[in-house]
Amino acid sequence: MSIQTNQSLSVDCVLFGFDGTSLRVLLIERPAYNNLERMKLPGSMIHQSETMLEAAVRVLESVTGMKIHYLKQLEIFSDPKRLRSDELEWIRQKYQIQTERVVTVGYYALVKLDRHLLAHVSRKGGRWVPVDEIQRLAMDHKLILSSALAMLCREMLLSPIAFELLPKKFTISELQRLFEAVLGVELDNRNFRKKMFSSGFLVATGEKQKGVAHKPAEYFIFDRSAYRRAVKEKLRMGFIDNWRY
Amino acid sequence: MSIQTNQSLSVDCVLFGFDGTSLRVLLIERPAYNNLERMKLPGSMIHQSETMLEAAVRVLESVTGMKIHYLKQLEIFSDPKRLRSDELEWIRQKYQIQTERVVTVGYYALVKLDRHLLAHVSRKGGRWVPVDEIQRLAMDHKLILSSALAMLCREMLLSPIAFELLPKKFTISELQRLFEAVLGVELDNRNFRKKMFSSGFLVATGEKQKGVAHKPAEYFIFDRSAYRRAVKEKLRMGFIDNWRY
DNA sequence: AAACTTTTCGTAAAATATACGCTAAGCAAA
DNA sequence: TTTGCTTAGCGTATATTTTACGAAAAGTTT
């Protein structure tokens, strides 16, 4: 029943990207050590004078080389037995600390994939792996990933995070494919389009696709301020019109 | 840039109850110490071999004397400057530990208020304070409370947590008043009733109010398995019928 | 008995969601 | 050049849900 004094705190980050077809997660390949799983989530122990969030930002900006715009906390993973002794030993060696227990906070983040980012990440030993190809991960990182996926699905239905994963200009079909990939459903393209346009936060650019073997689609952009206006409008009008038991 | 080794981990819990009119939070009055705020949230340092969640359960079951059925994690509060030095000193004294930094995890929980619970809590130095009467709290507990309130609102619209706060048997009006208290809105009683009945998880008991100066209302109970069936039904049918941008 | 209060049942209109037909615009193959 | 294939994009009819209220019912208080 004694107070714990020799524990450490870390962050582990699930960074999602969308390549137009499938949802991908950024994984780090760590050097071989005994028989430990090689692939892990990007993470770090926290430093003296930073918050958990700042630690997560540090980890992600280091591996991507860019500013992270969407980053949220998941859960805290504090099972005293969450790390096997060999994993704990790896951590002691890597960070040169004596610790009996590592409590970690999961974060999930979204980025727009582009050539520049892909290049930077691969220089840093990172790999963008499609979520449905991930079988095993180091430590309890598979658990953290599951938590992130659940959060992503939930958020996708409630706030406009899809646009964090798409390029600035995108077609309605790309948007729809993203929804289908994340939620694992098929959607009717005509109704999907109607729903997306109904709130008026998609702005036509006038530009169209080129070189596609079918009618070229128009590119749209997401107007965040129009979105905020629409949300306010809804709140003024309906009371609880958006609950769903 | 060094790794933190001398920090501690704690939990702080926001326990909500509903007295039929207003939403209340359980606060603890701590002994006077310098000029620190007296009222704080129930909390504790974590022990060697328990998870954060287990620590929260321990704290809440100790102060209420009963099993806690609804308990969820909020956020982690890790600002290195979240505690003033006098608050930190208080913690060092209370727990007899040398620590430079206390990172805390917020939890929020729901209970049904009854006479028995009220009595037990007041023996333990706890007080049920209406949320809108809380001006200041110790440390950053006001911040944790805000986080809990935001979470409560969000959850109230998405899952049937209202029934965790009401007695087993309740009238539709009581249910409505709870919604109004938590969300801070006024609702049309006829439409509220329709909405609540539409999913079919409210079961009539046949019992009615007695001694009220108007038409007596019937008591209902929440049928959790009917609720689960209704949710499944919805998922089979609609695709994304419950997103709300 | 009249007044008052809250419960409870209804109903009509408005707004949203769903299912699906059909044309448009590009490329590729014939 | 024509035919076929594919996805984009428009429209419409029907079903479902939400919203705004009217009014009766069942008690207590005056």
Image (tube, coloured by chain):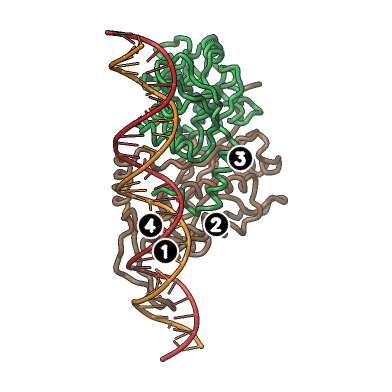
Chain colours: A green, B brown, C red, D orange
Q: Which of marks 2 and 1 is in front?
A: 1
CA separation, marks 4 and 1?
10 Å
Callout 2: SS? loop
Q: Which chain carries label 3?
A: B
Can residue A13 be seen from the camera position used here?
no
Residue B218, relative to residue B160: is it above or below? below
Residue at the extreme right of the image, as rendered:
B35
Q: Quickly name the residue at label 1.
A: B190
Chain-order first, disc 2 or disc 1 = 2
Q: How crowded is mark 3: few (under 14 residues within 10 Å), some or many (20 or more)?
A: few
Q: Quickly name the residue at label 4.
A: B196
Chain-order first, disc 2 or disc 3 = 3
CA separation, marks 2 and 3?
43 Å
Image check: D3 left or right of B7? left
Chain-order first, disc 4 or disc 1 = 1
CA separation, marks 4 and 3?
52 Å
Q: Quickly name the residue at label 3.
A: B96
Q: Quickly name the residue at label 2.
A: B184
CA separation, marks 4 and 2?
18 Å
Chain-order first, disc 4 or disc 3 = 3
Q: Residues within 10 Å of mark 1 (few under 14, many from 20)?
A: few
